[in-house]
Image: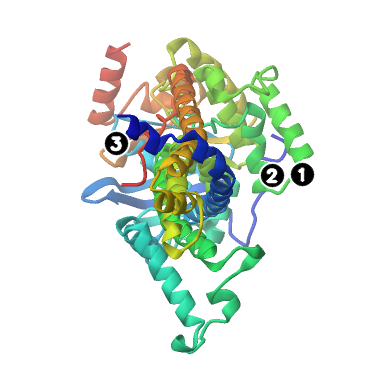
Amino acid sequence: MDDAPTTALSGDGTNEGGSILALDDVCKSFGSLDVLKGVNLEVARGTVTCVIGPSGSGKSTLLRCINLLEPPDRGRIMLEGKEITGKVTGDQLNYVRQRVGMVFQQFNLFPHKCALENVSIAQEKVLERNPGEARDKAKALLERVGLGDKLEEYPDRLSGGQQQRVAIARALAMEPHVMLFDEVTSALDPELVKEVLDVMKELAAEGMTMIIVTHEMGFARDVADTVVFMDAGVVVESGPPSAVLANPQHERTKRFLGQVLENR
Amino acid sequence: MEYIFEYYFDFGLMKDQFDPVLEGFWETLKLSIIAGILSLVWGLVLAVLRQLPGRAMAPVRGVVIAYIDIFRGIPLLLVLLLVSGFLSSAASPVGGEILPRSVGVPDWFGQPSPFWYGIMALTLTYGAYMAEVYRAGIEAVPGGQMEAARSLGMSHGQAMRYVVVPQAIRRVIPPLLNDYIALMKDTSLVAFLGFTEVVQAGFNFSSSDFNGSALTLGALLFLLITIPLARIVDRLIAREQTKTQRGGGGGSVAPPIPTGMAGA
């Protein structure tokens, strides 16, 4: 990524000591179901944050709040020094989605478009790049994720791992400052997980700011700068993997890790 | 027994009356093609308006839903009489000439006003039917498609235009063709306004000759178009189904829309 993490602030916001993203008491309910009950989180630029926790703990909702697919009910989210919560306006959505890329568990590739078009369409329609430039960029990104020979393939001709790598390339094409990964390997056959994780490791090594919801504890241990354990809509504990994963302080974290490791 | 055959299949009469009946059928085709295209467009407009998100658009959605309910719920003949009656009277001294004659009693492109009243009534009614078909198609596109498009920064309109609607249309071509077949048969109602399409042409002969062969001829002409169309629909559905069964890796391929005849 040529311009990802280094380009500093836009707007007149302040940097808040290197944090690219700061969540303060973020709450989200669906009807009577309180999914997020006051989440606090700070993400430093260029770091990898892995969010772990039992299903239903609000991990995915947290990501969806960060890019305003689900606007939070309460609390504040600061993105590069600018508040993105409150009354959601079109400008605000643009501000967020120009800076935050997202990769989904179900890939959500556009099935009527080939790999190249999947990666180029939003460049053309949102960033208004000319088609040639968008294609060149798409081609370069697909080569980078190891799919240089699949440019013209349609999603239904690609394996899950290949589809997910196209999805990563598609998000990167918009040159986001933060990438959100929502259980991106959970829908994959086990032998396809590694090729996707490898791409993500590479991205991390290049300094991309990433927030990753995952069940891959090995990956979290190797790649994360910060591990966040969530349960029942709150952050129970967070810190470097050596602390949270190897030496958890909270009973709930211990129990969760015990269960996860038992299943291995 | 012989009389039955003679009444329906007097080949001598058919031969004599072929040209005027064919001329009537040509009017039928013109009506159905023009009204068919307008209904396709009007139906899509209605369906997209119905999908507009947010509280601010609730009145628009409400008006569209009411429109669809009303026009699907009343007979086409009634619509035809209401449209033609209003327009012609509004352009006459009775209605205070609130409409210019060229609008109230249109004779555009050399076609008489009943032809255009027919186009309007067919479009109003079949637009409502087709809007429902489009809606089923749009709703069958997985929600992740809209989310992926939005997360790439597309507006709701862009996501509909480039991602959702193209996928929806592919799936609804068979049921739309079914609606077109129904529309084509319903053009015969324009005979009620004294317009000589194929049914009226055949009826003129049958009532003066006491022989239905001209009507049989009209029926055969209809079948010449509607049976091949029905086969095309079958083939499209079969193709869509094999595609859906094959597309295992996609995870985002929804089943095709079941076809239902609109003329209920």
In the figure, is residue A72 to the left or right of B98? left
Q: Dot 3: few (<14), some (14–19), or many (≥20) neighbours within 10 Å?
A: some
Which residue is located at x 59 percent, y 22 percent? A199
List the residue tagged with mark 1. A130
The disc placed on residue A124 is 2
Mark nearer the N terminus (1 vs 2):
2
B134, above or below B1, in the image: below
Amino acid at the residue labelled 1: Asn
Mark nearer the N terminus (3 vs 2):
3
Q: Can the viewer see residue A251 in this picture?
A: yes
Amino acid at the residue labelled 3: Ser
Secondary structure found at label 1: loop
Image quadrant where residue B179 sits: top left
Which chain is home to disc 3? A
Which residue is located at x 59 percent, y 27 percent? A166
Mark nearer the N terminus (1 vs 3):
3
Residue B94 image position (x, y, % from top left): 44, 87
Q: CA distance from mark 1 to mark 3?
A: 42 Å
Q: Dot 1: few (<14), some (14–19), or many (≥20) neighbours within 10 Å?
A: few
List the residue tagged with mark 3. A57
Asked if both marks, 1 and 3, belong to the same chain, the answer given is yes
Q: CA distance from mark 1 to mark 2?
A: 6 Å
Does the CB distance between marks 1 and 2 fall below 8 Å? yes
Secondary structure found at label 2: helix
Task: Name the mark nearer the viewer: 3 or 2.
Answer: 2
Which chain is home to disc 1? A
Amino acid at the residue labelled 2: Glu
Residue A26 image position (x, y, % from top left): 36, 51
Does the CB distance between marks 3 and 2 fall below 8 Å? no
Residue B78 image position (x, y, % from top left): 35, 63
Which chain is home to disc 2? A
In the figure, is residue B245 to the left or right of A128? left
